[in-house]
Amino acid sequence: MPKQDTPQQVLAGLTSKNQFTKTGTTICGVICKNGVVLGADTRSTAGDIVMDKNCEKIHYIAPNIYCCGAGTAADTEYTTELISSQCKLHRYRTDRDTRVATAKTMLTRHLFQYQGHVSAALVLGGVDVLGPHLHTIYPHGSTDTLPFVAMGSGSLAAISMLEQGDADHQGWRPNMEVEEAVDLVKRAIHAGIFNDMGSGSNVDICVITKDEAGKVAADYRRNTDIANPRKYRRDVPYKLPSTRLVEVNGDMDM
Amino acid sequence: MMLEGHDESFNENPKANGEVSLGTTIMAIRFDHGVVMAADSRTTTGSFIANRVTDKIYKVTDNIYCCRSGSAADTQAISDIVKANLTVHSLELGQPPAVNTAAKVFRSMCYKYRDQLSAGIIVGGVDSTGPHVYSIPLGGSVVEQPFSIGGSGSTYIYGYCDAHYRPGMSKEECIEFAKSCVALAMSRDGSSGGLIRLAVITPDGVERQVVTGIEQ
């Protein structure tokens, strides 16, 4: 019978083996008519352990630009926050909405400067005055501009859904309607969730579109699909709330 | 030192360092009044193809283009910096920059940071002195050639190119030569594939072409 580690031993093992909290991850993005749809799973892991069953991998960069992040969770979080803040200052300085190319350049320069040691693989998508844009950014600082992309450990499963589809559904094609694209992204993330061990839990979606008037709106649909609901829950043997109030002192401020 | 297109981690653990490389077959040929640049379209991370429709022919100025091979991050960063430098230079000069100048700017960066970079670049363009092709391989040397091949796939076509290249070929002959060279390399090199992208640079402008499927 294998010996069970104590929680302290597990944590010690994680730090010594350099198993930082990573977003195992499936993230993807597609360009559709008038906009961009981004999708991500919600599992974050440290080695073999799931650290967060419902984390947020779609990060805010600007009102019209969002960025999915795979790799080391701290790196993706910090890098996207840094660039988001730089973009806000840039908006104040230029009195214009941020362009996706600006965010892309800032992210690329930052990652290239750190020569791949900042382990952040990003899917950057947004709509600006020039239209919808979608880019992948790799940890060493290279970028690709494509109509559909997937990154992370589940990217192989996701990209196969985007390239080919399955028996009942088609893959990506140009000028898809927004809801069709959302459905495609959901299926791609599903493929990652169920076929990749580093990805799991739920699906987050972010839809960024420009309407006829030219106004750009971002619709962040957190937990749009709870693919792995917690089915079994044992009732607790006590009634909640369990702390009995004896006496309330008049002034609660200390 | 890491060879173009193949790193040591390739066989044990393809995604060991996650570096994105332009496996690549690139070439440029000079003809009487212009240059034909050609490249495949595959970018790989280990054995996974990150982008199967990459454009490796990058516009440095209206009259000068470069073909990129080696590390995607390094070549993109270098190309962006050289493009910015040459844009300012041409504004100060008051005319389009010479291809020679572009090659020197590339070289200065590739040589200075030769230990940190993995970039093999072919510069091609047309200026007031005519068409030119410069090759800047890994160490940062520059050499002007009538035609130049580069990338991991080029090793398979050295013999073919030497046997079939003739000085004084016409534009159409050069285009067909480039297509057949890149196609042959793509069929033998695992790190090259996808489409064949072409750019034909003449004093009248630049014509971009795409060839899908491997020509027989």
Image (cartoon, helix red, strand yellow):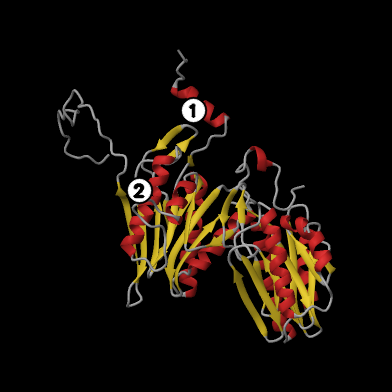
Residue at the farthest front position: B216
Per the image, label 1 sits on a secondary structure element best described as: helix
Residue depicted at 65% across the width and 37% down the height? B12
Label 1 crowding class (10 Å Cα cut-off): few <14, some 14-19, many 20+?
A: some
Viewer-side label of 1, 2: 2
Q: What residue is pinned by disc 2? A: A203
Q: Height in image: B198 above or below B140?
A: below
Residue B103, above or below A142: below
Residue B14, image x and y in percent?
62, 43
The answer to whether any part of residue A234 appears in the image is: yes
Amino acid at dot 1? Leu
Helix, strand or loop at label 2? It is strand
Residue B85, position as x, y percentages in the image? 70, 73
Residue B88: image location, x then y, percent: 69, 78
Q: Mark number for residue A11? A: 1
Q: Residues within 10 Å of mark 2 (few under 14, many from 20)?
A: many
Return the disc, 1 or 2, that comes first in the chain's sequence: 1
Give the chain letter at badge 1. Answer: A
Question: What percent of the width, then of the height, locates residue B113?
Answer: 76, 57
In the rendered image of this protein, does residue A218 appear above or below residue A228? below
In this image, B5 relative to A84: left or right?
A: right
Quadrant including the C terminus of chain A: top left
Q: Is residue A54 above or below residue B155?
A: above
The outermost residue toward the top is: A1
Q: Residue A53 lies in what quarter of the image?
A: top left
- Image position of B111 (left or right of A222): right
- Res. B66 visible in picture: no
Label 1 to label 2, Cα distance in Å? 28 Å
Labels 1 and 2 share a subunit = yes
The residue positioned 19% from the left and 28% from the top of the image is: A242
Instruction: Name the residue type under label 2.
Output: Val
